[in-house]
Amino acid sequence: MALYKFNLFLFFINVFTYHAAITAFRSLKLKELHLGQKPLPLDWTIEGINIAANLGLIAVGIYYGINFSVEGGIIAGVFGLGGLRNSYVNIKRLRGKIIYKNYWLMSHIGGMLGSYIGAITAFIVNNNRWMHLPEIVAWLGPTLLLVPLMIREINVFKKIKL
């Protein structure tokens, strides 16, 4: 739909959400990075696409913020910066910079919950005409409510070091 309507913002949000799901899936295949396993070129391509899309999301946010609404710019910027942070963490993992024994499980949990947050956000935004939430609450509310829970869950597994 984003490509059909030529909506770059939605396209970049799609990449952001799909990246979370793909990262969760690929983390199950990369359980031995700490033992010298090499990531596939596909893994680097996934991160490259995500970085490009999130830089695009930040650019769209700046454009929206200047030309349309500050609120839209903030939304795009928050997602763009969050996506870049996710790629940073994943690239460290792919390069073998691992300190936690269950790194693959933490990546899987983070990716699955991240894609779930994306699905909840999409549902709320698409049904907001009945809920009447402020736009920024519809877009960022699920993230603000669920990311702390995701961090808490991942921190449980950080107690187990290599």
Image (cartoon, rainbow, N blue to C red):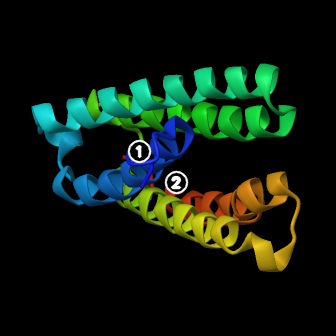
Tell me the tag on residue 15: 1
Q: Height in image: 83 above or below 160?
A: above
Q: Quadrant of residue 66?
A: top right
Q: In the rendered view of the protein, which quadrant contains the N terminus?
A: bottom left
Who's the residue at 64% across and 69% down the image? 126
Q: Residue 15 vs residue 135: left or right?
A: left
Q: Quadrant of residue 91?
A: top left
Mark 2 or mark 1: which is in front?
1
Name the one closer to the observer, 88 or 159: 88
Name the one closer to the observer, 37 or 17: 17
Q: Residue furthest bottom?
A: 130
Q: How far across and how far down the image is residue 153, in percent?
A: 59, 66
Who's the residue at 39% across and 34% down the image? 50
Who's the residue at 60% across and 20% down the image? 59
Residue count near mark 2 (Cα–Cα under 10 Å), binned few <14, some 14–19, many ≥20: some
Name the one closer to the observer, 116 or 127: 127
Q: Which residue is mark 2?
A: 158
How many numbered badges does the structure rendering display? 2
Residue count near mark 1 (Cα–Cα under 10 Å), binned few <14, some 14–19, many ≥20: many
Q: How far across and how far down the image is residue 105, in percent?
A: 37, 61
- Of labels 2 and 1, earlier in sequence is 1
Q: Residue 138 vs residue 39: left or right?
A: right
Residue 125 in sight from this viewpoint: yes
Q: Amino acid at mark 2?
A: Lys
Residue 104 in sight from this viewpoint: no
Q: How far across and how far down the image is residue 159, in percent?
A: 54, 57
Who's the residue at 59% across and 33% down the image? 80
Q: Residue furthest front?
A: 5
Name the one closer to the observer, 160 or 17: 17
User: Helix, strand or loop at disc 1?
Assistant: helix
